[in-house]
Image (tube, rainbow, N blue to C red):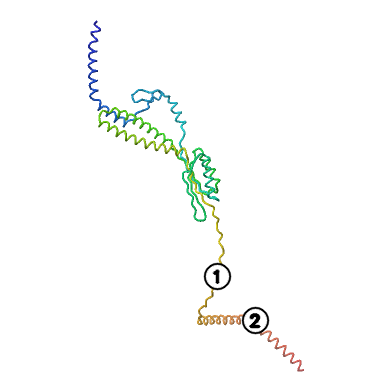
Amino acid sequence: MMNAKRLIGPVFLLACLMLILIACGAAEGPQAQMVEVTRVVTETVVETVQVEGEVVVVAEDGMAATPEPIGTAVHQTAQQQRLIIKNGHMTITVEDTETAVNQATDTAVQLGGYIISQQVWDDGAYRFATMRLAVPVLRFEDALRAFRTLGTVTNEAASGEDVTDQYVDLQSRLDNLIATRDRLRTFLDQATTVEEALRINEELKVVEEEIAVIQGRLNYLGDRAAFSTVDLTLNPWIPTPTPSPTPTNTPIPTAQAWHPGNTVQLAAVDLQETAQGTADFGIYYGIVCGPWLVFFGLVGVAGWKIVVWRRSR
């Protein structure tokens, strides 16, 4: 009996406290919902918390979802396929442009690809072509080897870009935005005033626009990583022309001007040189041969006199 009397007081106080909390909650209902809307837009709805070797996903109601071992999450990330955007460019000299275009098309189709764009034109004598082909990323190297057989490769380039991290980041942002959108739709259904509904709808519109932008970027990266592009420039083989010899025209002689004064000066110079040469010759040989000529002359005179003297006797 005494125990029952002692419990009456605490029970009465607890009942009064519950009535006060219910009244306060009813008075602050619409305002609290608006505060919650703002918090949802600015904070991450789902967060991952590591607790004693497990990954615990905290749900929107604050309750922990089914735990997933950390080793499993890391293993799945490690096994994730890398997303590589590959591009190639080749300039090829071919014997027949139309045949090369058909062969390149057949090669792309056989590898599971398709034509993105194609242009063929001629300059009146030869035909040229450019092609952009898409092939599965796993057959990119096979496509390059096949295209090299079309003719003589004069230029070739290939490049790759790893977009895995960018794709994973965009996917995470998209998941968070989708969760936020779903929360906003729930608040929109629970709105009690027109002003509250308009404000929630405006926030919902912004989130949906961001979702569309990120989804478009994800689709682009996924398509580009799934199919590589190869740009082909097909040039015809143009023989080098042999230049034909051109006849050399015989120049027509032209009469030169007559300058008699120059002729007189030239003759005077030649005469002077001839006289000097003759004088030098006489002086040189007169000195060298003169004594011998005198000696032989005297001997000849003496012999002639002796002959004359003998005949006179």
Badge 1 crowding class, 10 Å Cα cut-off, few under 14, some 14 to 19, many 20 or more, is few
Q: Can you tell which of label 1 and label 2 is closer to the viewer?
A: 1
Q: Amino acid at mark 2?
A: Cys
User: Amino acid under label 1?
Assistant: Asn
Extreme-top residue of the structure: 1
Percent position of residue 27, x then y: 22, 24
Q: Quadrant of residue 288?
A: bottom right
> What's the mark number on residue 249?
1
Q: Quadrant of the N terminus?
A: top left
Q: Nearer the viewer, residue 184 or 65?
A: 184
Q: Secondary structure at mark 1?
A: loop
Q: Which label sits on residue 289?
A: 2
Residue 42's place in the image compared with 99, above or below, is above
Q: How many marks?
A: 2
Which residue is depicted at the point 55% across and 70% down?
Answer: 249
In what element is the residue under mark 2? helix
Q: Is residue 237 above or below residue 114?
A: below
Residue 38 relative to residue 88: left or right? left
Rendered image quadrant of residue 35 = top left
Q: Residue 21's x, y, as percent?
A: 24, 20
Q: How dense is the environment of label 2, judged by Cα within 10 Å: few (below 14), some, or many (20 and up)?
A: few
